[in-house]
Image (cartoon, rainbow, N blue to C red):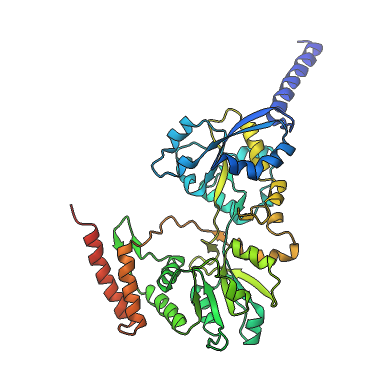
Amino acid sequence: MSSKIKMIVCTLLCTILISGCSKETGSFTKDKDVTLDVGYTKEEHFKQRYSALLEDDYPNFRVNVVSTKELLNPDTNPVQWVKENQVDLIYLPSELMDSFVQEGLLADIGPSIQKDDFDLERFVPSVIELTKTYGSGKIYGLPTNFYGSAIVYNKNLFEKYKIQYPEDQMTWESILLLSSRFPSTDSNNIKGISLKNTNLLDLILHIGQTSGLKAYDRQQQQVSFNGKSWIPIWENAIQSYTNGALDINADQNSYLTPFLAGERAMAVVSYDDYKRLEQEKLPFDWSTVTMPIDPAQADQSDSLRVPGFFVILNSSDDMDAAWELLKFFCSEDVARWEYRSDYGFSSLLDQVVSEFEDREKVTPFYKLSPKLDHDHDMLPNELLTISQQTLDQILSRTLSVQEGLDSLQTKADQELKRMTPMD
C-alpha cells in the first residue's frame, strides 16, 4: 500500500473516530426542542415549583406531568405502574427507592455524572452518602433537598449557670444529665430541654431505637423490654422527667415558644424550627449540636432524611434530555429560588445557608453519616397500652424500674401470644 493511500485511510479512520466521540460527548443545547414525561405528585405542584425557571432556562423544553399519587398506594406494583405510565424522569419518594432499584427500573446515572464532570462535591456529603446507600454504591438519582434535626442551645443560660455547652455526638444519657443540671422552679420556669416526643414513653422508645435496641420485632414476633441495656434508658429518662428537666411537647404550634423566650436551655429542632430561629431576633446567643448518637456508631445519625430523588427510568426514550432536566432540578438557580421553602434544606453545600457565617449552625443537621433504619418496628397499640400502664406504676413508685420491666416483659409476651395465635 502506497504512503498516499495509507494517509487517506488514516485520515478517514480519524474522521470516523472523532465523529463517534463527538456524538458521545456532545453537549445538550438549551434551545433544543424536547418533550419529556415527568412523574410528580401533582401537576399544579410541579408548575408552582419549577415552571417559571424552566421556561427561562429551557424555552423549548416541554414537560408533561404524570401524577405519581397511585405509587403511594402500598398495593401498587412498580413494574406495572411503569408499563402503564411511560415517564422519562420521576420524583420518587425515598421509601420507594428500594423497590424500584430491585426491579431494575432505574438508570444508573454514574456514567452521565462522569461524562459531564458533574461535580458531586457541590453536594452535602452525607446526602450523597445516603444516595449511594439506596443504590448499594451506585447512584440512581439525586435529591434536591433534605430534612434533618439538631439540638439548639441557649449559650447565655449555660453561662449563667456555669454549665459547659453541649457538644456534637453526645449520647442521650449525657444530654439528659446535662438538662438535669438546670434548676427548675415555679418562679423561673427554666427547663433543661424541650422535646418533640408525644410523651415520656415515646421518648424512652426513641432513645432505645437510637441505641440500636428493638422493643418489638414484628418478623420474629418477639418483644424485649427487660434487657440490661433498657434499664439505664428507663432510669435516666424517668429521673430527668421527675426532676422537671424535660419539657415534652408535641404541639408544633407552641413547641419552640419557651426556647425563644429564654426558658429552655436546649431544644430538639427540625428544619421548620430552624427557619423560625433564623427569622427571630433573639435576645441571647445560640448555636446547635448534632442529635444524640449510638455510642457504638458515633459517626452515624438517623436524623437526616431525604424526602425523594429525581431518577431516570431505564425505559426513557431520551436519556440525554432526562439527564439535562435532572441537572436543572439540582442547579443553584433552583436552589436559590426555593431557599427556605417548605421543601427542606438544599442539598447543595453553598445553598444550605445564605450567609457563610451561619454555616456552623447548620452543619450539625448533616454532619454525621446517614443511617437507614429499616429494622425499626412500631409497637402495636396493645403493647403500647401495657407499656404506658407499667410506666405509670414506676412513676407512682408502685414498682421499681427493674420490677416494672420484668412485669412488662411477662405481660407483653402473653399479649403477643394472644395477638398471634398458633395455627
Q: From the viewer's perspective, is residue 296 above or below residue 308? A: below
User: The N terminus is located in which quarter?
Assistant: top right
* Foreground residue among 41 and 156: 41
Can residue 139 be seen at all in this image of the molecule?
no
Residue at figure coordinates x 72%, y 47% from the top left:
333
| Residue 177 percent across, percent down from the top left | 51, 81
Q: From the viewer's perspective, is residue 339 above or below residue 26? A: below
| Residue 232 percent across, percent down from the top left | 41, 78
- In the displayed orientation, state which residue is furthest to the right: 4
Q: Is residue 266 left or right of residue 377?
A: right
Residue at figure coordinates x 24%, y 59% from the top left:
419
Residue at figure coordinates x 57%, y 60% from the top left:
148
Can residue 177 be seen at all in this image of the molecule?
yes
Number of marks in picture: 0
* Foreground residue among 190 and 215: 190
| Residue 86 percent across, percent down from the top left | 52, 30
Asked where in the image residue 213 lies, by quadrant, the reply is: bottom left
Asked where in the image residue 140 lies, by quadrant, the reply is: top right
| Residue 198 percent across, percent down from the top left | 45, 69
- In the displayed orientation, state which residue is furthest to the left: 423
Residue at figure coordinates x 80%, y 13% from the top left:
3
